[in-house]
């Protein structure tokens, strides 16, 4: 059974996936990566990573939402066009509220549970090694645990899932620091919430992260026996290295 089929059979009605995304205005996205490759190239890289996630996770048997920011008509039009260009028609679109990251995520969870969902998972577009199997496992773990996290190697998390409203998980967290995951787990302990962890993955935040990703993608594409994943990784590698500044960064790292 291939990865997508395994994912589909694990899904049930009442599961929703939210992909948090920001409009890719240069200078407003991937600002740490931009220190290595510039604002324009960082914006292009962000769009490529986002498109990779949209194509990979918009085909599965759950409700899929792009939770976009800022909440403007231009942003909505841009995301609708972007998903169409990436041949991913199954996404729905909801705006993020104007608040800090924790409040924005909590509002999405609250809205989905109010709509009758039983398990809700949120991801970003910073961890391109995230697979359908990882997301399927997150939904499965929520059958027995209130919370699931996908830990990032920088101390944050690339995925969070809940099986009921839990606003306390997102309160008084020092976002964008190495303490995010540990503080979130402490919130779970304080509120008697059982939390499970997925495998750790690396967010693509800085130049060395991108170099390591491209080296991994190249090796994974050559060694993987999963034809669909090979095709996805090959496209990711080709698209990213087509950015002149990224190609130069790779040359400097060799």
Image (cartoon, rainbow, N blue to C red):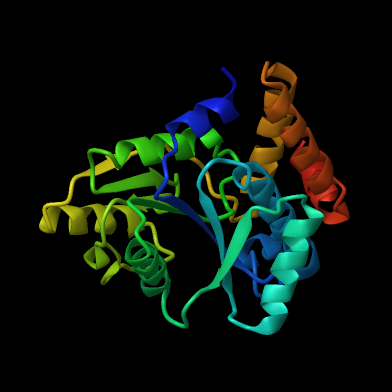
| Residue 135: x %, y % from top left | 47, 40
Q: Residue at x 71, y 51 (%)?
A: 88
Name the side, left or right, on which 132 lies relative to 151. Answer: right
Locate the C terminus by quadrant. top right
| Residue 247: x %, y % from top left | 84, 46
Q: Residue at x 51, y 52 (%)?
A: 63
Name the side, left or right, on which 220 lies relative to 234. Answer: left
Locate the N terminus by quadrant. top right
Q: Is residue 38 visible?
A: no
| Residue 210: x %, y % from top left | 67, 47
Query: Closer to the camera, 129 or 89?
Result: 89
Quadrant of residue 31 within the rendered picture = bottom right
Q: Residue at x 78, y 60 (%)?
A: 44
Image mark count:
0
Query: Closer to the camera, 212 or 118?
Result: 118
| Residue 28: x %, y % from top left | 65, 75
Q: Residue at x 39, y 50 (%)?
A: 14
Q: Is residue 148 above or below residue 47?
A: above
Name the side, left or right, on which 74 lies relative to 98. Answer: right
Q: Is residue 192 visible?
A: yes
């Amino acid at each position: 059974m291939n990865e997508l089929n395994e994912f589909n059979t694990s899904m049930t009605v009442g599961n929703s996936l939210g992909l948090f995304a920001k409009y890719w205005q240069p200078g407003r996205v991937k600002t740490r990566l931009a220190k290595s490759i510039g604002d324009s190239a960082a914006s292009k890289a962000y769009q490529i990573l986002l498109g990779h996630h949209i194509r990979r996770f918009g085909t599965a048997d759950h409700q899929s939402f792009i939770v976009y920011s800022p909440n403007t008509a231009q942003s909505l039009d841009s995301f609708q066009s972007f998903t169409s260009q990436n041949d991913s028609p199954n996404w729905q679109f909801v705006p993020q509220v104007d608040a800090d990251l924790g409040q924005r995520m909590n509002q999405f969870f609250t809205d989905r549970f109010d709509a009758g969902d039983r398990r809700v998972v949120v991801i970003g577009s910073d961890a391109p090694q995230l697979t359908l199997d990882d997301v399927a496992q997150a939904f499965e773990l929520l059958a027995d645990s209130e919370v699931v996290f996908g830990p990032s190697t920088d101390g944050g998390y690339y995925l969070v899932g809940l099986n009921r409203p839990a606003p306390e998980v997102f309160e008084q967290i020092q976002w964008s620091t190495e303490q995010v995951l540990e503080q979130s787990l402490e919130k779970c302990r304080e509120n008697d919430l059982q939390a499970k962890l997925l495998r750790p993955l690396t967010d693509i935040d800085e130049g060395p992260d991108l170099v390591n990703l491209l080296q991994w993608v190249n090796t994974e594409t050559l060694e993987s026996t999963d034809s669909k994943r090979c095709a996805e990784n090959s496209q990711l590698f080709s698209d990213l290295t087509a950015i002149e500044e990224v190609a130069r960064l790779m040359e400097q790292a060799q």
